Image (tube, helix red, strand yellow):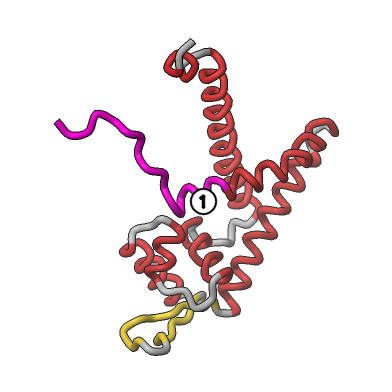
């Protein structure tokens, strides 16, 4: 068996199907969690992108918009729009960067930090309630999968931080 046959064989197809199934399951879980959080906290008017940016600022106080764009893999103009909206709502504060008066550093205000904590608490409550409806063996399986899911998240983050080189190919013609 050569490398091409092994790469396209049943084991490779099975691994690809498992990865596709995992990706689909994670995407469905994210959508369901977003829906559940919106139902559980209808008063939260912030969009998920706003909450993700606000969370990133709470994790990285003093971050600059360009840094957030790279961290979150967003376009700089999208970050600027979100930052402007959050600042207008009193969720973020801007300060001139030390040593560079043209640059701005962002910090979550108390209201911004409270919004992040409320969002995290709502998500945790929705997950806790949903988990309580599952049979014990499924709850145990999910608990056992937490370390693997954390490792998977770190691996995806590493890939996002330094994308792999494209595979060698025939090159330009």
Residue 121, horizontal then vertical, whole percent: 69, 60
For residue 13, side relative to residue 113 (left or right):
left
Inspect the magenta stretch and tell me whether residue 159 lies in it: yes
What segment is highlighted magenta in the picture? 155-173
Inspect the magenta stretch and tell me whether residue 43 lies in it: no
Which image quarter: residue 165?
top left
Mark 1 falls on what kind of element?
Answer: helix
Above-or-below relation of 106 to 117: below
In front here: 76 or 7? 7
Identify which residue is drawn at 44% across, 76% down. 87
Looking at the image, which residue sits at the far front? Answer: 2
Identify which residue is drawn at 52% across, 62% down. 51
Above-or-below relation of 148 to 104: above
Quadrant of the image containing the C terminus: top left
Identify which residue is drawn at 66% across, 48% down. 150
Identify which residue is drawn at 73% across, 41% down. 130
Above-or-below relation of 153 to 17: below
In front here: 93 or 165? 165
């Amino acid at each position: 068996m050569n490398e091409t046959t092994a790469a396209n064989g049943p084991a490779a197809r099975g691994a690809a199907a498992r990865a596709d199934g995992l990706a689909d399951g994670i995407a469905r879980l994210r959508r369901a969690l977003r829906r559940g959080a919106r139902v559980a906290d209808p008063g939260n008017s912030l969009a998920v992108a706003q909450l993700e940016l606000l969370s990133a600022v709470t994790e990285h106080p003093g971050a600059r918009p360009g840094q957030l764009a790279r961290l979150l893999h967003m376009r700089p103009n999208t970050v600027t729009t979100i930052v402007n909206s959050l600042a207008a709502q009193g969720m973020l504060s801007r300060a001139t960067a030390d040593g560079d008066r043209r640059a701005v550093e962002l910090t979550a205000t108390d209201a911004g930090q409270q919004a992040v904590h409320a969002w995290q608490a709502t998500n945790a409550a929705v997950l806790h309630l949903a988990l309580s409806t599952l049979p014990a063996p499924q709850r145990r399986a999910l608990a056992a999968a937490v370390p693997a899911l954390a490792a998977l998240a770190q691996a995806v983050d590493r890939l996002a931080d330094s994308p792999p080189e494209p595979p060698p190919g025939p090159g330009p013609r």
